[in-house]
Image (spheres, helix red, strand yellow):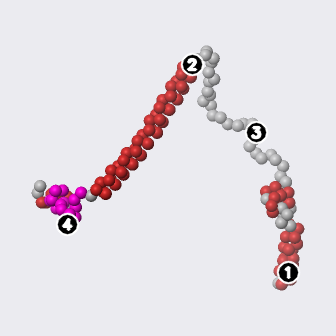
Amino acid sequence: MPTAALALAGQSGRGVADYDSSGGGGFDIIGSITNLALSGILLAAFAFIGKYALDAVSEVGKSAAAVAEEMAKDDGTPQATVSNEPLFDDSGTGADDSPVTKRSKKRLVTNEEIARMAPWMAAKIDQDAIEKAKALRKKKKEAGK
């Protein structure tokens, strides 16, 4: 082999038989066993995946046969026709006709709503005390001006 081709291939031109124990090279038994074991694991993984692919194909085939058999059965009853018209709900105007309940501007959430949404907090929140504290702060602020 020409030396230019060997240089491009990254080889020095020596064969496997040319390597000796001092020159670094030779037959690596540990590497060969490791390579064989990893190749076996990879082959087993491919076989495992292939088995599931074959199982999936067979299940699709069985299902297709069952569906074809059901479709072939014709008991003489007329099939329901499907309309090509658009579907929509015209049962009402779409407006929210529920009555509007007004709340006081001071309380955004009623005690019943607190008990319903967060029952563990119902006993801890005293909205009357909150309103009194807000009024007191407002008075102090106005007095400080």
- Residue name at image x 50 percent, y 28 percent: 62
Question: Residue tagged by mark 3?
Answer: 92
How far across and down, in percent of the image, does residue 69 sit?
54, 22
Q: Residues within 10 Å of mark 3 (few under 14, many from 20)?
A: few
- For the residues labelled 1 and 2, the Cα–Cα distance comes to 87 Å
Question: Residue tagged by mark 1?
Answer: 140
Q: Amino acid at mark 3?
A: Gly
Q: Nearer the viewer, mark 1 or mark 2?
A: 2
Is the Cβ of the residue at disc 2 closer than 8 Å to that at disc 4?
no
Q: Nearer the viewer, mark 2 or mark 4?
A: 4
**Res 73 label:** 2
Is the Cβ of the residue at disc 1 closer than 8 Å to that at disc 2?
no
Which span of residues is magenta-colored?
11-27
- For the residues labelled 3 and 1, the Cα–Cα distance comes to 54 Å
- Residue name at image x 34 percent, y 54 percent: 34
How far across and down, in percent of the image, does residue 17 sit?
16, 56
Quadrant assignment for the C terminus? bottom right
Question: Secondary structure under badge 2?
Answer: loop
Evaluate whether residue 84 shows in this view: yes
> Which badge, 3 or 4, is on the more N-terminal residue?
4
Question: Residue tagged by mark 4?
Answer: 22
How far across and down, in percent of the image, does residue 129 sit?
87, 70
